[in-house]
Each structure stands twice: as structure tokens, then as C-alpha cells.
Image: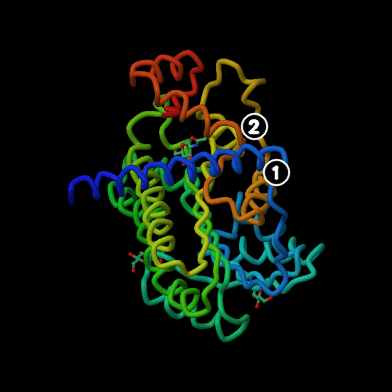
């Protein structure tokens, strides 16, 4: 009798689950043609880590146009000042420079405290330091200099943990917040040799961090949104671009950092949980995962990108 009952419950659960899956798919399909509205960014206090160059700089310039208060964190004071100056040309929000060595926990604590007292509680968090366009200098040194390997990993993943440890509690208290995690697949390129391996490994750590935060916040139901953005290498600046040979360059033409920042912010403002720039590529991975691993190697060799879409 009890067995029959639990069988009944199981079947009921499965039926309900299939309905839920069905509706999730329908909504996802509907969202392709009619994306969710862009949320307003005024009143947001955004922190952009790695604001001195590349995507970080473009992120700041773009955010500042939407009435957001932006705290620009970088270790390079002159570069960060330039970002602030560029942003202020078209900015309607406040942009301010904060100099911080983000691999140093004490400096992170101090910096977040001063952002809090000067701009208010942090509500949005962007970390743009582990994108190879930004850290390729760190990488190229890593060939001769072993401590640089540690620096790469510290910058790409350890800094996330120090920063989030400071930023998340106040988001949890406020019951809202948006954490944007960028991960780049450029690091997986096989054409550039061994020195990319530390960064490549760190990219997976960053993706794992995003997914565990998403699971955690879904469980605790506290309205903190974690967005994972996959950036594909052919979008990046000439610095990295020259490293990667393309078989079909026109097809995978490079997208300038400015456009990447715009696409990232659009996805973030729509509260997407995971997307890629360019947008369609995330799905290539889903398709290629159906096939044996060998197939994805063959496709990436054909394209000469050295990128493993799976
Ligand atoms: C950056 O800007 C701040 C404030 O505007 C200024 O005090 C500082 O000297 C500037 N630093 C550099 C390196 O330009
Ligand atoms: C940043 O901080 C770390 C940890 O304290 C230290 O090892 C590193 O040398 C610092 N880097 C710079 C450029 O000051
Ligand atoms: C594609 O794969 C990613 C994981 O890499 C997953 O998050 C996403 O939901 C998948 N998309 C579809 C349409 O299956």
C-alpha cells in the first residue's frame, strides 16, 4: 500500500516536472523573439574591477551613461584616471577612481569600505580582470617567471573571493544585487603554447564560482542575480587577436571592446543568468556536447581557433 502511494507521488512529481520543463522551454523560446525589458540603472552603485583598460574601461564608460554611480578599481592609477576622464565626457552618473591591489585582502577591505562611505552600498559588481586582453602581459611573462603563474591565478580567481566576501553580505542584507562574472575562452587556445594553462584553469574556476553562487542564491531565494558571461576570443583587442590564427577570419571577425561592453550590459540589464558574446556561440557548445569529445576537437582544428566549444 505504502509502495503504491510512493509510486503515485513519484509519478505525480514527474508529471509536474514535465509541465514545468515544458513551460520553461516555451518561455525561453518566446524570450528569443521578445527579450525581457532592460532594467534601469539609476541608483545603482556599480564596482568595476580592472577599470583601467579593455573591457573594464568600456564597461565604466557605458555604465556611467545610465545614471549609475561607478567605482573604478584598478592598480594602475594613471590608466584608471584616464577611464574616469573618458567616462565623464558623456557621463550623467558619478565615476570615481579607487586604486587597489585586488590580490591583497587588506587593500580590498579598505577599498570596499571607502566606496561604501563615498558612493553608498554596492549593488552591482563587475570583475573584468581575468579576461586575457587585460592580463596577456601577465601571461607572456609567465613563461620565464614562475611567480607570474601565481599572480595570474591570484588575479583571476583569488581576487574574486576577497572582493565578493566584502560585497555579498551587504547585498544579502539589502535583498538585492547583481554580480557579473566574465569568463573568456581565449585562454583555451592550443596555438599559443603552455603558458596559457594557468589562466585557462582559472577560467574554469571562475565559471565554477558563478555556478555555485547561482545555486546558492537560488536556494536562499534572496534576489541576488549572478550573471555568467562567456566571452569568445575573437571579440577581443588586437593584443590577443594576433595570438590566434583564424581559418575563417571574416566569419569570426573581431568585435571591439566597446561593442562587447554594450552587449554585456544589455544582457545584464535583462537579468540573464548566462549568455555569451557573440550570442550564438554558447549554443554551439551545447550541440557539440552531444557528440563524442573527438568531434569537438576535430571541429576546432578545422576552424584553427584552438577553441574547444564544448
Ligand atoms: C588621478 O585623479 C586624481 C583626482 O582627480 C588626482 O588627485 C590624481 O593626481 C590623478 N592621478 C594621476 C596619476 O593622474
Ligand atoms: C599585491 O598584493 C600581493 C599580496 O599581498 C603581493 O604579493 C603583490 O606583490 C602585490 N602587488 C603589487 C603590484 O603591489
Ligand atoms: C547550453 O549550455 C550551457 C552550459 O554551458 C547551459 O547553461 C545552457 O542553459 C545551455 N543552453 C541550452 C539552450 O541548452
Q: Is residue 77 left or right of residue 93?
A: left
Which mark identifies residue 76? none
251 above or below 51? above
Q: Position of residue 107 (x, y in %)?
A: 42, 75
Task: Label 1, secondary structure: give it.
Answer: helix
- The tag earlier along the polypeptide, 2 or 1, is 2
Give how far across and how far down residue 212 sits, in percent.
36, 55
Front one among 1 and 255: 1
Residue 71 at what x, y percent from top left? Answer: 61, 71
Q: At 50% across and 47% down in the image, what residue appears?
A: 131
Q: Quadrant of residue 139?
A: top left
Count of picture labels: 2
Residue at figure coordinates x 54%, y 36% from the top left: 232
Per the image, the residue denoted by label 2 is 254
Task: Identify the mark at residue 259; answer none if there is no mark.
Answer: 1
Q: CA distance from mark 2 to mark 1?
A: 10 Å
In this orientation, which residue lies closer to the viewer: 83 or 262? 262
Q: Which residue is depicted at the point 30% across and 45% down?
A: 8
Count residues near mark 1 (Cα–Cα under 10 Å), then give few for <14, some for 14-19, many for 20+: some
Is the residue 235 above or below the residue 128 in the image?
above
Amino acid at each position: 500500500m505504502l509502495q503504491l502511494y510512493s509510486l503515485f507521488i513519484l509519478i505525480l512529481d514527474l508529471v509536474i516536472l514535465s509541465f514545468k520543463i515544458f513551460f520553461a522551454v516555451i518561455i525561453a523560446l518566446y524570450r528569443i523573439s521578445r527579450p525581457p525589458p532592460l532594467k534601469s540603472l539609476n541608483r545603482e552603485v556599480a564596482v568595476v574591477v580592472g577599470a583601467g583598460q579593455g573591457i573594464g574601461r568600456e564597461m565604466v564608460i557605458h555604465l556611467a551613461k545610465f545614471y549609475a554611480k561607478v567605482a573604478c578599481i584598478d592598480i594602475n592609477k594613471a590608466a584608471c584616471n584616464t577611464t574616469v576622464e573618458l567616462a565623464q565626457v558623456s557621463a550623467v552618473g558619478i565615476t570615481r577612481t579607487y586604486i587597489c591591489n585586488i590580490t591583497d585582502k587588506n587593500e580590498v577591505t579598505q577599498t570596499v569600505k571607502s566606496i561604501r562611505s563615498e558612493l553608498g552600498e554596492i549593488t552591482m559588481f563587475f570583475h573584468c580582470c581575468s579576461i586575457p586582453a587585460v592580463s596577456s602581459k601577465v601571461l607572456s611573462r609567465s613563461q620565464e617567471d614562475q611567480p607570474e603563474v601565481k599572480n595570474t591565478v591570484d588575479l583571476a580567481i583569488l581576487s574574486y573571493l576577497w572582493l565578493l566576501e566584502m560585497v555579498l553580505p551587504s547585498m544579502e542584507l539589502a535583498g538585492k544585487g547583481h554580480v557579473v562574472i566574465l569568463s573568456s575562452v581565449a585562454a583555451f587556445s592550443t596555438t599559443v603554447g603552455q603558458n596559457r594553462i594557468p589562466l585557462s584553469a582559472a577560467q574554469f574556476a571562475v565559471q565554477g564560482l558563478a555556478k555555485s553562487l547561482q545555486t546558492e542564491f537560488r536556494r536562499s531565494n534572496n534576489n541576488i542575480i549572478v550573471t555568467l558571461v562567456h566571452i569568445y576570443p575573437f571579440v577581443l583587442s588586437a593584443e590577443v587577436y594576433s595570438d590566434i590564427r583564424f581559418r575563417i577570419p571574416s566569419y569570426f571577425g573581431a568585435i571591439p571592446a566597446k561593442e562587447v561592453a554594450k552587449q554585456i550590459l544589455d544582457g545584464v540589464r535583462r537579468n540573464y543568468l548566462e549568455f555569451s558574446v557573440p550570442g550564438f556561440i554558447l549554443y554551439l557548445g551545447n550541440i557539440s556536447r552531444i557528440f563524442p569529445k573527438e568531434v569537438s576537437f576535430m571541429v576546432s582544428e578545422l576552424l584553427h581557433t584552438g577553441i574547444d566549444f564544448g
